[in-house]
Image (cartoon, helix red, strand yellow):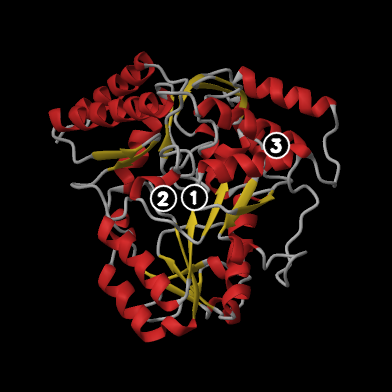
């Protein structure tokens, strides 16, 4: 019998490319039919067939409080009653800007936009305008949205310019993007020695979440800050995913490193479409209308999105919030690790704050190449077994997962128990 999910997927493919509005949702990596969700509450979601799941995707990060948090929903309702969009300044935009600058000391000024892609794209344009240089450095496996110059993967050799990894990206754009290995201090230093005077900026996920969860070494991060300062390049922390996810000051707070620019999204919108970029005042003052770097957006600073974001930021500032969130995430990770070890399954998990990674590998990866060496087929089997058991993980071996404040210890334990049963059945 055809399920409602299958019916919707077949219908969607007639009018939507691939049947989805963002590629990973199509389940192409894991196979099978994507779940069309119709309801979410707390730590749970329900699909079109009415099946209930414990959710570890969390809208890919924003749902840090859990889905449909009543305080956030009420803030959205109240804002919507006053008007959905004005295309004019509002006091609430100032409230958001002031709050972000208060929470992240690296932000002296901030500009609100409508998405993480828009934030990173604008930050890179700003860095180029500020420095008068064209070249940028990114790291293989880090995703910064779908702007042309960022859709580039590494070529061969230390200083090889990247090649477009998406059709429709001109090589003339890609040739200004240098792609290096994540967590490779020697390569980074050699690149700056060879081309430092040409590098406008370095953009990095300071904890990667788009090649699964990959943590940087302290040596790598502090060298990155030193080299950018020495060569006059702008250091951009892409904290769209990690901002207020891994801790109250983002990754920059964990490492004690001050980037020149920071991009934000996800949590600061509380589930609504929002993004932001900000940093040093002297750089931000190059943005129009003060400077010659143009950036604009009709829905930037959406009053409804900003209301949701402010309500979320207020709640995550509660004493003990991050301690509890981190403990719940560590409970999941340690439980999964123990279960896999008990049954001799080649599997490890890792976490930071409310983010986690699952790897069918002998050790936690520290680079894109190591992530790619994990057992994708085992992940796919695990994913579908857990989905059938009512536990919804990201449908890809190369995406981080998320725990919310709505996940209880009992929720975590039930997920570990389901995984333990799968590990037992797949031991050896």
Crowding at mark 2 (Cα within 10 Å: few <14, some 14-19, many 20+): many
Q: Are marks 3 and 1 in contact (CB under 8 Å)?
A: no
Q: Which mark is residue 252?
A: 2
**Residue 347 position in % (x across, y down):** 22, 40
Which residue position holds label 1?
239
Frontmost of labels 1 and 2 is: 2
Mark sitting earlier along the chain (3/2): 2
Which residue position holds label 3?
305
Q: Which mark is residue 174?
A: none
What residue sits 48% from the left and 24% below the top?
A: 318
Cα separation between marks 3 and 1: 18 Å
Left/right of residue 424 with respect to residue 296 in the rendered view: left
Crowding at mark 3 (Cα within 10 Å: few <14, some 14-19, many 20+): many
Crowding at mark 1 (Cα within 10 Å: few <14, some 14-19, many 20+): many
Residue 158 visible in rendering? no
Mark sitting earlier along the chain (3/1): 1
* 75 shown above or below 191: above
Looking at the picture, tell me which residue is in the foreground, 379 or 141. Answer: 141
Frontmost of labels 3 and 2 is: 2
Q: Are marks 1 and 2 in contact (CB under 8 Å)?
A: yes
Q: Quadrant of residue 272?
A: top right
**Residue 114 position in % (x across, y down):** 69, 48
Give SS at disc 3: helix
**Residue 54 position in % (x across, y down):** 45, 22
């Amino acid at each position: 019998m055809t399920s409602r999910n299958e019916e919707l997927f077949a219908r969607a493919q007639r009018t939507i490319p691939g049947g989805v509005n963002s590629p990973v949702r199509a389940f192409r990596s894991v196979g099978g039919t994507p779940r069309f969700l119709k309801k979410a509450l707390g730590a749970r979601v329900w699909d079109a067939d009415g099946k209930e799941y414990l959710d570890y995707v969390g809208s890919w990060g924003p749902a840090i409080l859990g889905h449909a948090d009543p305080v956030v929903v009420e803030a959205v309702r109240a804002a919507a009653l006053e008007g959905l969009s004005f295309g004019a300044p509002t006091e609430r935009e100032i409230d958001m800007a002031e709050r972000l600058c208060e929470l992240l000391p690296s932000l002296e000024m901030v500009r609100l936009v409508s998405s993480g892609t828009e934030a990173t794209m604008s930050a890179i344009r700003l860095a180029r305008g500020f420095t008068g240089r064209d070249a940028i450095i990114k790291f293989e496996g880090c995703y910064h949205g779908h702007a042309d110059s960022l859709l580039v993967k590494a070529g061969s050799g230390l200083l090889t310019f990247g090649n477009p990894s998406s059709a429709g990206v001109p090589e003339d754009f890609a040739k200004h993007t240098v792609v290096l290995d994540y967590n490779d201090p020697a390569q980074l230093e050699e690149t700056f020695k060879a081309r430092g005077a040409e590098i406008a900026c370095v953009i990095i996920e300071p904890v990667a979440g788009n090649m699964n969860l990959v943590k940087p070494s302290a040596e790598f991060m502090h060298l990155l800050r030193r080299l950018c300062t020495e060569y006059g390049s702008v250091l951009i922390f892409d904290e769209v995913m990690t901002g207020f996810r891994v801790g109250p000051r983002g990754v920059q707070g964990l490492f004690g490193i001050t980037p020149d620019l920071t991009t934000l999204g996800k949590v600061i919108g509380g589930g609504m479409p929002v993004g932001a970029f900000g940093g040093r005042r002297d750089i931000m003052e190059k943005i129009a209308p003060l400077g010659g770097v143009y950036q604009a957006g009709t829905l930037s600073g959406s009053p409804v999105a900003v209301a949701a974001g402010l309500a979320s930021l207020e709640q995550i500032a509660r004493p003990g919030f991050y301690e509890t969130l981190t403990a719940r995430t560590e409970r999941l990770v340690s439980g999964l690790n123990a279960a896999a070890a008990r049954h001799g399954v080649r599997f490890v998990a890792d976490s930071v704050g409310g983010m986690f990674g699952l790897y069918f590998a002998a050790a936690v990866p520290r680079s894109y190449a190591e992530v790619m060496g994990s057992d994708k087929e085992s992940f796919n089997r695990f994913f579908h077994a857990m989905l059938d058991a009512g536990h919804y993980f990201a449908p890809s071996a190369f995406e981080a997962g998320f725990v919310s404040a709505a996940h209880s210890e009992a929720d975590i334990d039930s997920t570990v128990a389901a995984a333990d049963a799968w590990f037992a059945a797949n031991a050896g």
